[in-house]
Image (cartoon, grey):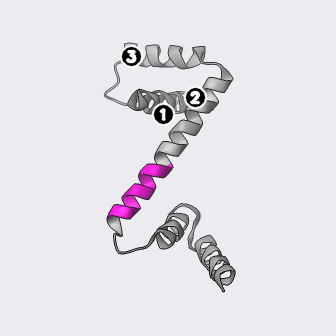
């Protein structure tokens, strides 16, 4: 079910911007996906978006753990911040954490 949610939200976002769907999505399947999403309540769409965000964040963190097995959890979190929000913020977070520990 999680895979279907990912496809549905991704495709709706692209359609809303006027971008054509994935080339491997049959037009009939595209219409079914869009109709299903249109039937969702705003609350259900919001829960779906939050669920997908959680999935992407956990997948990203897991990829970092695999790519940097030598880093401890704190260093991995700083790396995550650097990759997603920039080196400047990561540096400030790192300094803040160091001050808190002192």
Residue at point 50%, 64% (across, down):
80
Quickly name the residue at label 3.
29
Q: Does dot 3 land on a helix, a strand or a loop?
A: helix
Q: Is residue 61 magenta?
A: yes
Q: Position of residue 70 (x, y in %)?
A: 35, 75
Q: Position of residue 48 (x, y in %)?
A: 56, 31
Q: From this viewpoint, which residue is outermost toward the front?
A: 101
Q: Position of residue 100 (x, y in %)?
A: 68, 79
Q: Which residues are magenta?
A: 57-66
- Number of on-image labels: 3
- Point out the image quarter for the N terminus: top left
Residue 18 appears left or right of 60: right
Residue at point 68%, 83% (across, down):
99
Question: Chief secondary structure of the magenta span?
Answer: helix
Name the N-terminal-most of marks 2 and 3.
Answer: 2
In this view, the mark in front (1 or 2): 1
Name the N-terminal-most of marks 1 and 2.
Answer: 1
Q: Does dot 1 land on a helix, a strand or a loop?
A: helix
């Amino acid at each position: 079910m999680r895979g279907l949610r990912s496809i549905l939200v991704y495709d709706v976002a692209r359609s809303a911007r006027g971008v054509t769907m994935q080339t491997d999505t049959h037009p009939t399947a595209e219409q079914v996906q869009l109709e299903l999403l249109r039937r969702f309540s705003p609350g259900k769409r919001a829960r779906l978006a939050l669920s997908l965000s959680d999935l992407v964040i956990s997948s990203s963190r897991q990829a970092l753990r695999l790519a940097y097995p030598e880093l401890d959890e704190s260093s991995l979190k700083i790396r995550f911040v650097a990759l997603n929000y920039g080196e400047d913020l990561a540096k400030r977070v790192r300094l803040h954490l160091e001050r808190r520990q002192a």
